[in-house]
Amino acid sequence: MSEKIDKLFKEPGFLMNVVETVRDGLMIVDKEGIILLFNRAAEEITGYRKDEVIGQQCSILDSDTCVVLTEEGKQRSCSLFKTGTVENKRCRIRSHDGRSVHLLKNATVLTDGNGEMIGAVESMTDLTSLYLKEVELEELRHELRQEYWFMGLLGKSAPMQKLFDQIRNASTSEAPVLISGDSGTGKNLVARAIHALSRRKEGPFVAVNCGSFNNYLLESELFGHKKGSFTGAISDRTGRFEAAHDGSIFLDEIGDMPMAMQVKVLRVLEEKVVERVGDNTPVPVNIRLISATNRDLSALLSSDLFREDLLYRINSIMIKVPPLRERAEDIPVIAFHYLKKISHVNGKDIRRLSPEAMHTFENYQWPGNVRQLINALEHSAITCRGDTIEITDLPDYVFSEKKAKGHDRNAGRHNLQAALSLYKGNRTLTAKHLGISRVTLWKKLKEFGIE
């Protein structure tokens, strides 16, 4: 076999035929950068003919990799003859007609039999179409963020637009905010958005999950402690209220806070001071309180599990985060956004959901809200074998629950009829009252068979 190959290489014109038939552009230069060889693919990529470039400096291609910044300004410099190789380097050249051509460049120096450098060979792969697609995709992402993205929250539905307005309004005030909503709706994102838009945005944002600690640990977590105040207190510790000074403190799941702690938090809100565990020295704190809960605080009041005076202190501004089931039109937007992230993390090129898969997602109730939707996308991405998530890739639980759900369906029909009656059949006013779009209202009317 090697003898046949050797014979082929000795055939006149064999190597040039190989050079001319490869799909990548090939260019050979001497050690001064003078172009000696330029194949047909290089002509097609650059727009230059061989007779226009052979004998010319390779700088005629105006590659951005040949320009370095110095104290005197931009200077041309070729690093290839210093490093010896260039591997998978993205670059841009200027074509004969002035267009920018984006390339993937590989190059290596050439030596003679004595190891002396005599030039270099460079291959170029045209990535222009790929680059333009990347730019287009980034522009689409930007448009998506501009139109549907707000401080980490995604949604184009009327309930979400109303939520965005409430966040903006809350951020202009210093009053305490109470955020309610089902688990997984993004209450923490709402809290962060309020802080980021407020006058306290340069200050700290400190979050505490009140359901993660027992009574004793929560007190130390919120107020800090002095060294030796209890077993294990080997040093002084700053509490979360102190850490949030001149910023915002976010008490997540405040409905799970023990009654004994509620009294102490109420004192902090009223007197603007904290006392560390094991110390009676009051420490002034300047904080803006943002709370969140997925529980019905009114029901907790009736059961003597939440203090009424504390509730009045924390709910000056009330914001309800809509569950995903009430804004199904946002599901494609959210799914598209997170699918890109998930497919990248999993090393896959998943670009879309099939219409059947998307329809199933839109008709599922999502008790776990956006968090559960992300989980379902992660499951689907693992099982997906192509670039499209099919209905067979979805987790089984999305098929177990339908839109029509017994008494919930009847209650929804009754509320819809009541709103229509209130506004004498005016669909625009009815949709606004319900916090949904006219399209969603039309779908609900059709679903319930209401004329």
Image (cartoon, helix red, strand yellow):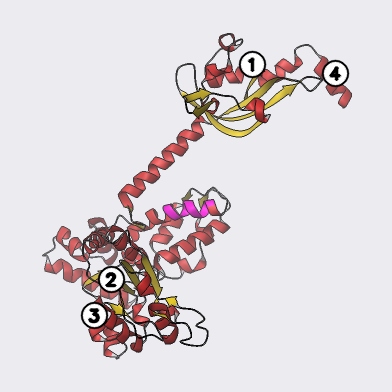
**Residue at 44% over, 63% down:** 373
Q: Which mark is residue 347?
A: none
- Quick check: can you spot residue 102? no
Marks counted in the figure total: 4
Secondary element at tag 1: loop
What residue does disc 2 label?
A: 286
Closer-to-camera residue (349/190): 190
The quarter of the picture where the N terminus appears is top right
Residue 262 lies in the magenta-colored region: no
Quarter of the image where the C terminus is located = bottom left
Would you say the residues marked 1 and 2 are in contact, meaning their CB atoms lie under 8 Å apart? no
Q: Earlier in the sequence, mark 3 or mark 2?
A: 3
Majority secondary structure of magenta residues: helix
- Please tell me which residue is depicted at 49% across the width and 59% down the height of the picture: 377
Q: In the depicted view, which residue is nearer to us: 152 or 218?
A: 218
Marks 4 and 1 sit apart, C-alpha to C-alpha, by 33 Å
